[in-house]
Amino acid sequence: MEEIEMKKMLSVLVALILTLGLTAALAEETPFTIRNNVTFGMNMDDVIASEPVRYHEIDNEHAHGGVTFAELEYKHVTENNVPVEIKYLFVGNELVAVRFNYEARDIGYEQLKADLAAKFGPFSALDPAALGRGIYAVDDDGRPEFGAESAVQGNVAVVLELDEDDIDVTFVDLAAGYIG
């Protein structure tokens, strides 16, 4: 009888370990969702189809520091009840970064930083070298100004930059091929 109980406990333990392992594996494979089911690696047509805002501008062949971006830009968007301009940045028709540009008068920098830190961890001074060529997704000339800060979670870097009149929040896919 004791042997049967031991086998049952062992079976339950094995099932539990397999379930936990599968859950962890699935969690690692779940892509980061930017908004409206948009994830890194999508092509421009898929992003346009996912974005509920219909009016957009496409700026192709936009070179920054040896990296050619295509930009898909949406103006007059509202995110969390705040107006924002969104730029989806593509390299080789693959979404590699997204920049949200807020007017500083519309949103509090410290509150936005606290909200992002709650999800991505603490922010520290931006190390441009850590982003590789992804720095051109953050700033066109590859030299962020105004004390940019960043946080990293998994393969996603979040860069927060405040200047006199706007706040930029850029999500960069650190696993994208163009980074290296």
Image (tube, rainbow, N blue to C red):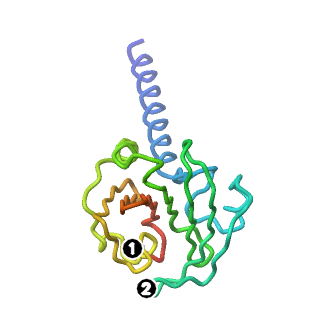
Would you name the residue on which mark 2 appears? 65
Q: Residues within 10 Å of mark 2 (few under 14, many from 20)?
A: few
* Residue located at (54% from left, 43% from top): 80
The answer to whether 84 appears left or right of 174 in the picture is right
The answer to whether 45 appears left or right of 111 in the picture is right
Would you name the residue on which mark 1 appears? 135
Q: Quadrant of residue 74?
A: bottom right
Measured from the top left, where is residue 95 in percent x and y? 57, 67
Quadrant in the picture for the C terminus: bottom left
Instruction: Label 2, secondary structure: give it.
Output: loop
Measured from the top left, where is residue 82 in percent x and y? 54, 46
Q: How crowded is mark 1: few (under 14 residues within 10 Å), some or many (20 or more)?
A: many
Checking the image for residue 102, the label placed there is: none
Viewer-closest of 24 and 10: 24
Measured from the top left, where is residue 14 in percent x and y? 44, 33
Quadrant in the picture for the N terminus: top left
* Residue located at (44% from left, 51% from top): 105
* Residue located at (44% from left, 77% from top): 140
Q: How many labels does the image show?
A: 2
* Residue located at (55% from left, 70% from top): 89
Tell me which numbered mark, 1 or 2, is placed earlier along the sequence.
2
Q: Furthest-top residue in view?
A: 1
Instruction: Label 1, secondary structure: give it.
Output: helix
Asked if residue 106 is positioned above or below residue 134 in the image, the reply reads above
The answer to whether 122 appears left or right of 15 in the picture is left
Q: Could you tell me the amino acid type at mark 2?
A: Gly
Asked if residue 27 is positioned above or below residue 144 in the image, the reply reads above
Q: How far apart are marks 1 and 2 (CA)?
A: 9 Å
The answer to whether 60 appears left or right of 116 in the picture is right
